[in-house]
Amino acid sequence: MQRKWRVSWLFLVFLLGSMKFFISPRISYGKSAAEVLKAYEGLSGKERESKLIEGAKREGKMVLYGVTTVDQTKRIFDEFATTYPFIPISHYRSGAESVYNKIVTEARAGRYEVDVAELESGPVYLMAKNGLADPYFSPSRKGIMPEFMDKEGYWTAVYHLVVALGYNTTHVKKEEVPRSYDALLDPKWKGRMSLDQTDMHLMGTLLEYWGKDKALAYFKKLAANEPMLRRGRSLEAQMLAGGDIHIAPWLYGYRPATMKREGAPVDTVLLEPILTVPTYLMLAKNSAHPHSAALFIDWALSRDGAMRVFAEELGNAAPRPGYKDKFPELIVSRYLVVGPDLIGPNFEEYTKLFCSVFKGC
C-alpha cells in the first residue's frame, strides 16, 4: 500500500511539474532572452518575424520600463499597435535612476517583470555590467550611426536629445548671447543662469573630452557665476520663458524650440562640442516575453517605427539620418554623445564631483 502511495505521489509531482511547464507565462524555462531568440538567427526577415509573432501571441503581453514622458510613450504604443495589435503593453515610467533601482530590486527578489528597458547612459552601463540585460543585435540596427550603439549589442539608441543653450530674447540681446563655453564665465551672467541638479552626466562627458584637470578648473569658474540649480529641465525652460533666469546652457533643445514656436520669448544656440543625450533600448536578460520584446525593439529601431515618430512628430533627434526632423536647427553632422561606455565606468565619481563643485545636490 505504501509503495502504491509513493508511486501515486511521484506521478502527481510529475503531473504538476508538467502543468507548470505548459501554463507558465515564461517560455524560456531557464534560458535567457538571448538564448531563446538565438533560435531565429539566420532566418530571413519575413520568416523571422513570423516566428517572433507566433511566440508573441503565446506570450500575450510585453512590459516596458522607461524614462520617456507618458504622453510621448502613449503615442509610440498607439503606433506600435497598428502593426502588432495582439501585444498589449504594460508600462512603468520614472526617472532613469528610479527605473534602474526598480529593475534591481525586482531581480533581487527573484521577480523579472520587465522585458524592455528604456534608459539613459549611466543606468544603461550598470544594466549591462550587472548582468540584467542581454545582447540583442536587432536587424533594425542597420543604418543607425555607430556612436549610438555598442558593438556587443547591449544598447541601441531609439532617439537622442540635443543639448542647447536657451536664452530669453527679452533680457538677452542677440549680440550678447554666449556662443562658447568660455563665454559663460563672463561675470555678467552671475546669478542669471541655471543648471539642472542632475547634470552630472553632462559634466562627466566634458571631463572625459577636455581632460579632468582642465574641465574641473572650468567648472569651478562656472560655479563662481552662481548658477541656480533646479530639478527638471521643463521647469528650467519655464523659468527661462518667464524671465526668472536669462540663460540655461544645458537644456534639451527641443523644449525651448517648442516654446519658441508657441510664441515664448526664447531661442537657442549650440555650443561646441555639441552634447547629446541618447535614450537606449535594452533587452532584459530574464524577459518573460522575449518574442514580444524582440518585435518591439525591431519595430522601434526601424526606419518607419518609433524612431520616425520621435524625429518627425515629437521633435527628438534620430540616431539615423534621413528624416524630416521637426527641429532641423538642432541637427548637425557630429555630436559629442553622452554614451554609456564613456561615462558609465566613472559615473559615481562624476556625481560626487558635480555636487562638490556646484553645492546643490
Image: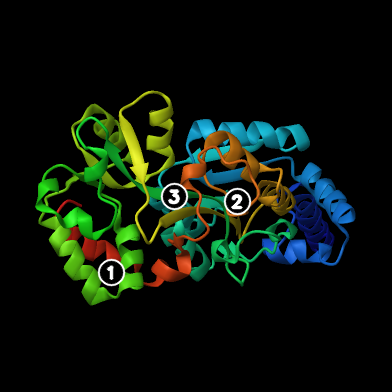
- Residue 349: image tag: 1
| Residue type beneath disc 3 | Val
Q: Residue visible at 50% across and 33% down? A: 70
- Residue 116: image tag: 2
Nearest to N terminus: mark 2 or mark 1 = 2
Q: Residues within 10 Å of mark 1 (few under 14, many from 20)?
A: few
| Residue type beneath disc 1 | Glu
**Screen quadrant of the N terminus:** bottom right
- Is 223 placed left or right of 324 in the picture? left
Q: Residue visible at 19% across and 33% down? A: 171
Q: What x and y, as percent, mark residue 52? A: 81, 51
Q: Label 2: state its secondary structure.
A: strand
Q: Label 1: state its secondary structure.
A: helix
- Compared with 296, 34 (above or below) is below
Proximity of marks 2 and 3: CB atoms separated by less than 8 Å: no
- Residue 162: image tag: 3
Residue furthest top in the image: 263
Q: What x and y, as percent, mark residue 3? A: 82, 64
Q: Residues within 10 Å of mark 2 (few under 14, many from 20)?
A: many
Classify residue 5 by image quadrant: bottom right
Q: CA distance from mark 2 to mark 3?
A: 24 Å
Q: Residue visible at 15% across and 63% down? A: 220
Q: Nearer the viewer, mark 1 or mark 3?
A: 3
Proximity of marks 1 and 3: CB atoms separated by less than 8 Å: no
The answer to whether one can see residue 281 in this image is yes
- Is 339 placed left or right of 178 in the picture? right
Nearest to N terminus: mark 1 or mark 3 = 3
Q: CA distance from mark 2 to mark 1?
A: 28 Å
Please name whichever residue, 157 or 257, is drawn nearer the observer in this view of the structure. 257
The answer to whether one can see residue 31 in this image is no
